[in-house]
Image (spheres, rainbow, N blue to C red):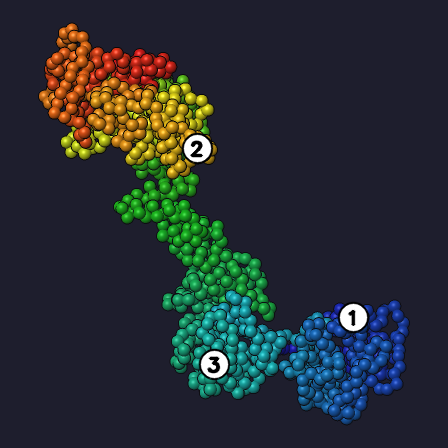
Amino acid sequence: MRAVPTWIDKVHDRDKVEQCIYDLAFKPDGSQLIVAAGNRVLVYDTSDGTLIQPLKGHKDIVYCVAYAKDGLWSPEQKSVSKHKVSSKITCCGCCDCVFEWTNDGQYLALGMMNGVVSIRNKNGEEKVKIERPGGSSSPIWSIAWNPSKDDHNDILAVADWGQRLSFYQLSGKQIGKDRALNYDPCCVSYFSKGEYIVMGGSDRQASLYTKDGVRLGTVGEQSSWVWTCRVKPDSNYVVLGCQDGTIAFYQLIFSTVHGLYKDRYAYRDSMTDVIVQHLITEQKVRIKCRELVKKIAIYRNRLAIQLPEKILIYELYSDDLSDMHYRVKEKICRRFECNLLVVCSQHIILCQEKRLQCLSFNSVKEREWLMESLIRYIKVIGGPPGREGLLVGLKNGAILKIFVDNPFAITLLKQSTSVRCLDMSASRNKLAVVDEHSTCLVYDIRTKELLFQEPNANSVAWNTQCEDMLCFSGSGYLNIKASNFPVHQQKLQGFVVGYNGSKIFCLHVYSMSAVEVPQSAPMYQYLERKMFREAYQIACLGVTENDWRDLAMEALEGLDFDTAKKAFVRVRDLRYLELISNIEDRKKRGESNNELFLADVFAYQGKFHEAAKLYKRAGCDSRALTMYTDLRMFDFAKDFLGSADPKDTKMLITKQADWARNINEPRAAAEMYLSAGEHLKAIDIIGDHGWVDMLIDIARKLDKAEREPLAKCAGHFKRLKHHGYAAEIYSKMGDLRSLVQLHVEACHWDEAFELVEKHPQFKNDVYVPYAQWLAENDRFEEAQKAFHKAGWQDEAVKVLEQLTHNAVVESRFNDAAYYYWMLSMQCLDIRSFICLPDNENKKDDMLKMFHRFQHLAELYHVYHSIQRYTDEPFSSHLPETLFNISRFLLHNLTKEVPLGISKVNTLYTLAKQSKALGAFKLARHTYEKLQGLRVPARFQESIELGSLTVRSKPFHDNEDLVPMCYRCSTNNPLLNNQGNVCINCRQPFIFSASSYEVLPLVEFYLEKGITDEEAVSLIDLEVPRTERRAARWQEMNSSESQSLRLDDSVDDPEEDPFMAKLSFEQGGSEFVPVVVSRAVLRSMSRRDVLIKRWPKPLSWQYYRSLLPDVSITMCPSCFQMFHSEDYELLVLQHNSCPYCRRPIDEPN
C-alpha cells in the first residue's frame, strides 16, 4: 500500500495565524470537501484542492461538520440551523439501521468527555449507554459506524484517549478485545464499504487499519497532530486535517500481492488474508493471517506468505491435484526486507535489489547470489526437489538461469533493454522476454538467435502443452502466436500470467480469471501450410466442433489419413472413418495410387466432377460411372461415357432402370430393362404390376430356348389367374409337367385328365391332387377312388377308414357297411401290389384285414335295419325279416360287439318280433337277457311290460319259424350257441342279404388237382339226364333199425352223385365239407351252381342250389346272395346293389 499526495493546503486567518482543522466532511458524491477551520467552514473542490467558498455564520470555533444524504444546507440558504445541548459533546456519529430497522430509522451515537458512549434514537431518547473502563480519564474522542451492508449487525468503532480502539454492536456488546494504539486518537473514519479504517492523532500521522483493527501502514506523516481524517466516498482517497491548519489529500494505491503456479493462484485479500484459487475448478480457500500480508509465493504443493515479522510456509494435505486444504509446515520467525519472494520445494528465495538469498525452511541461509544489476523478474522453472531452477531477468537486460544447489549463475543471453517479464517454453528451448519498451522478443536458447519480436506487450506466457505457442497481452489485446505465423489478436483486459492448453490465465486489476480461448486461428495457420500433425496438436488444446471437422477434411484431402482419422473420431463421423479404414485396408493390400484415394475422398465430400476427373486420370473409368449412376446423375454419366463400349452403355441403362424402379416409375423402368436386354427384371416389374398385355407381348417375342424368362412370364400369369396365357407359354416351352401342374392348380380336371390319357407318366401328378381336392370338397368316396387310381393305397385306406369311423359315429350304419366292404376290397388290392418276398407277413395281414372288414360290413349292413326299427317310428321291414336279422346279428355278437352296434337294440328287436310271430320261448329268453343289461329309459317300460305279458303265453316257439339245414334236413333252434351253422352237420348257413332267410344252398369244394377254370368248363358241359322213374317207397333194413324211404331217384346213387356227397357220419363234432370230383361236376346243371369268383389269392367259392325252383341271384361285385324277387325290387328302388352299391348298368 502506498499513499500518494494529491494536493495540500494550509488554512490561516486574516492575521496569518494557523487555524486548527477540527473536522472534515465530504459531500455524498465526493465532489466537495467541507472543512471546519477555526470559526469558519470552508468548501473545497476535491479534484484539485481549490477553495470554492467560505461559509460564515459561526462566532465561535466549529468543532464538527457533517453532510446529510439529502444535504445539510443548500446554496440558497443564508444561515445555518443551530441546536443546543446541555453537556459538552466531543464527537457524534449517525447510522442508518439497515438490518433491524426500516430504511428511515436512524440512530445517533454520542461520545462524551466522561468516557461514555450514548446511542439515541431520532427523537433523542437514549437506547444504549456504553461506559468505558477508563471513565473520565479516557474521554471518547472519536467514534464511527461501519457503513458495510454485508455485515448483519451495525458495528461502532470507538477510539478514546486511553489509547484504545474498540468495536461494539448496536446492542452495546463489545466485539473482540481492545486494540492498543500507543497514541491518543483524534479521529476515526471508515472506507465506504467498511473494509478499512483510517485513524489519526497525537502520533502526527494517519494510519490504515483493517476493519478488525489490525494496523496496515502509514497514510501520511504530518508536523502536528492529525485532528481529523475522512475517506472520500466510494474511492481510495483520504483527507487529513491537522492542528496546524494543514489539509492533506492522499490517494491510497493498493498493490497486488499474488503468486501463480500452473492452475493455482494465490492472492492477498483485505490486506491480511490469502485466498488460494484453483483456476480450473474455481475452488477457493481462504487463509486468515490477521497480519499484513506483504509477499506471497506458490510452487507445486508449497505456499509461502510473508508477514511483517515472519514467513509462513504451508503445504497441501495430499498429492491430489484438486486438493485445496493447506496446513502450516514451517514458520520462519524473522523480519525480512525483500522486493520479491519465491518458494521452492525445500527453500525460499529472497530478492532484494541485486541480491538473491536462498534460505532453507529452518531460516538457514544456504546460498547467496549478487547480480550486476537490479533484479526485475524471477520465476521458478521447475526441477527436482532441492535442485529447482530459477529464471532471472535483470534491469540491464541480462537473463540468467540459477539452480538453487549451484552457487554460479548461468547467463542465457543478454539484451540491451531492461527485462520486464520472462517465460521459458515447455522444452526449455525457447525464451520469451518482454522488455521495458513493451516489446516481446523470442530467442532460441541454444543459438541465442532472435526468432521474432512483437510490439505492444506487457506480459508473456508459453503454452505448457504446446511447444510452439505463446501468448502476450498489451494495449487491451490478447495476442496468440503459433510458430512463425502472424499474430492472432482478440480483445482482452489485463495481464497474461499463464497459458495452459486452451486456457489463458489473466490478471485484471485484482482478480484472476481463466479465459477459454479457442485455438482456431493458429490451427488454420498450420492448415494453410499443410502441417496437419501440428494443426492436430493445436486442435487438441481446444477448438470448436466445426474446426475439428475442417481439420479432418483438410487432412483427408492432404492424404494424411492418420491425422484425419483422429479428427473424425473426435467428431464421431463414422462415414468418413469407414472410408479411411477402407483406404488403409487397400494400402495394406498393396494399392499405392494416391489419385485414386483422393478421388474417393472427393466423392465422399460431394465433389463428384473432380472425383470423376481423378478416376479417369487413374484409369478407373468404371468407378466414375458407378459413382454417377449410384447418385442417379445419368446425364453426367452419359457425358462421361461419350461413345464408349456398348457394354458400359447397357450397364448405364440398367442402372437408370434400377433408379426408375426405386423412385416408383415402374413402366419406365421396365421399358429401360427391355432396351438393355434385362428381360427378367422387366418381366418381374410387369408381372408385379399386373400388366397382362405387355407381359404376353414379351412372352410371344421371346424364343422358346429362353426358358427362364418364359417360366417367369408363366408364373406371373398363374398368379394373375390368366391360365390360358400360362398354358400357351408352357406349351411353347414344351414343359408338360408344368402344364399339368397348371391345370391341377386351376382345378381344370378335364384338361388334366386329357393330358394324362396322352401322357400316363403324369398320372400321379393329376390323380393325387384331384383326390385331395375331392376330399376337401367333402366328396370322400370319389377321393378314395382317385387315390386308388393314383396308386396311393395308404391314402385311399386312410380316407376310407375316416369315412367309416365318421359313419359309425354318426349312426349311418348302411354307409359304414358300404365303406367296410370297400376297405376289404382295398386290402385285397393292396395285397396284390405287394411283390417282395420279405413282405409275406404284410400279405397275411392284408388277408386278415380283408376277412375282418367283410365281416364288419355284413354286421353293420344288418344292424342298419335294427337301428332304423328302434330309432324311427315306422319300419318298412316285415316282422319275419327283422326276426331273422336280429337272430343273425346275435349269433355274430358272441365274441365282441363292434363300435356303434347296440346289443340292447338287437335283443329288444328280437324280443318284440319273437312275441309277435309266436316264438314265445325265444321271446321270454330274450327278455331275461335284457334284464341283465343297461337298458335306455325309452325302452324300460316297454321291456318290463313285454317281459310280463310274455309269461302269459305258452312256453314254446312257432314251428314255422324253426330254420332247417338243407344239407342234413335238421331243424335248428332259433338261438344257436354255435352261431349260424347247423347243429348237426356244422354246415354254415347261406343267408339272403335282404330278408336273411336261410337259402337252399350248399357250398362244395373241388378235389385236389381240379382248377377253377376246369371246374367251370365241366359244369358247363351239363350231361343230359335219363328220364326218372315214378317215385316209390323202398324198405331198408339194418341190424339196428328198419325204415321206409320214398325213393324218387335212380336206383344207382351215381345217378346224382352230388346227393351222395351230402351224406356224412352222424353226430360228428367237426365240419366235413362236400368235396366233388370231375364226374360230379359234369353231372351238375349250370343253372343250379353259383360261383363266387374272388380275385387272387382267394379261392373261388362254389354253391349248389338244392331247390332249383327257388330263384336265387348273386351280385357279381360283392357276391351277396338274394332271393331274385327281393333283389329286383331293391335294385328298382336304389338303381344299384343294396349291399355294394354297384350301379345296375355297370358291366361285370
- Type of amino acid under label 2: Leu
- Mark 1: few/some/many CA within 10 Å (<14, 14-19, 20+): few
Quote the CA–CA distance across marks 1 and 2: 127 Å
Q: Which mark is residue 948?
A: 2
Residue 676, image x, y percentages:
34, 24
Mark 1 or mark 2, earlier in chain:
1
Image height of 921 relative to 1147, above or below: below
Residue placed at 46% from the left, 62% from the top?
501
Quote the CA–CA distance across marks 2 and 3: 141 Å
Residue 136, image x, y percentages:
79, 92
- Mark 2: few/some/many CA within 10 Å (<14, 14-19, 20+): few
- Type of amino acid under label 1: Thr
Residue 1080, image x, y percentages:
13, 16
Callout 3: SS: strand
Q: Residue furthest top?
A: 1027
Tell how many labels.
3
